Amino acid sequence: MSFVISFCLSLIFVRFFAQKFPVDLPSSRKIHKVPIPLTGGIAIFVALLFVENQTKMVLLICFAFLFGILDDIEELSYKIKLPFQLIIAIVQLIIGPSEIYFLSIPLHGIFAKTIQTFWFMSMFNALNMIDGMDALACSTSMISAFLIGEWRLGFAIAGFLPFNLPKAKSFLGNSGSAILGAVLPISVLVFFKGDIGYATIFLGYPAYEVVSSFLRRIVRHKNPFVADKNHTHHLFMKKIGVWRTLIFLIIFSFLCNLLGLAEKFWSFAIFLAICVSLFIYCFSKSGNSNLDL
């Protein structure tokens, strides 16, 4: 049902009402050259409202969507975004598991809830970070959702995906990436019974992106909270093109999914080794090609 609703709404929005929606305008830190309507978030939002039967999850989806659509319209600064994200993170504490672990090691009390809140906000922003090229956030999130049996979210994304493939006719927008950033991390955390370590490995690609972006900006003496055009997908698109980059990062994300599902300590070691290698590779190639990674 969520697929049908999302697909039909996306088709109607793109075909007949694209000019009625906020658009993503081209800029120096974006790769598209023409304005693209931001219809994906609304289509996914409506689809999830029709099929979601948990009141607390509906509340989380609504908060995330309202924050995202406001960001689409007003282009909020990070100083305004952080308080909104904190509110959404507090809402997810109600939905999330009562016990928190890290690689099977139990965490307790206020420390556990603080770690959970920080983790959720990081993943929330991570899903937004990877929404920087056509179909990347949608395809990796859809696969992750299906692997944990989150069918409603997976099919809602799948309904929109055909309109987001290169060259995209529509974008998720901040409303769409906010919904993915809210629903997917908490669903993954519940699936792993509160184990943040294995949940992080499972969502390894967006987790890698948020950590590597923060480190890269700090090393470059830049504000770590200000967006740029220097993410992993940007670097690889310059070298191998859009479709090959999309396939490569989908494979990377899927590999992280499998490592997380293994729920073994060695999977964490392999994940770290892959991330460190990728980080070093990106920096070395950046230096050789004079790219500002």
Image (tube, grey):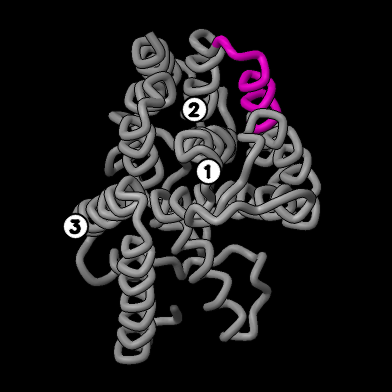
The N terminus, quarter of image: top left
Front label number (3 vs 2): 3
Question: For mark 1, what is the residue?
Answer: 24
Q: Amino acid at mark 2?
A: Thr
Asked whether 56 falls inside the magenta stretch, the response is: yes
Q: Earlier in the sequence, mark 3 or mark 1?
A: 1
Q: Left of 221 or right of it: where is 78?
A: right
Secondary structure mainly formed by the magenta segment:
helix
Identified at 68% across, 55% down, the residue is 115
Q: Amino acid at mark 1?
A: Asp
Tell me where residue 225 appears, x and y as whole percent.
Answer: 67, 65
- Lateral position of residue 37 relative to residue 54, left or right: left
Image x and y of residue 182, in percent: 58, 37
- For badge 3, the amino acid type reads Arg
In the image, residue 89 lies in the stretch drawn in magenta? no
Residue carrying label 2: 39
Front residue (pair 174, 218): 218
Please state the horizontal and vertical placement of residue 26, each as a whole percent of the image.
Answer: 49, 53
Q: Considering depth in this image, is 197 or 84 the residue closer to the camera?
A: 197
The answer to whether the residues at label 3 and label 1 have Cβ atoms under 8 Å apart is: no
User: In this rendering, is residue 169 above or below 44?
Assistant: below
Gap in Å between the C-alphas at discs 3 and 1? 24 Å
Number of residues whose C-alpha sits closer than 10 Å to that of mark 3, classed few (under 14), some (14–19) or many (20 or more): few
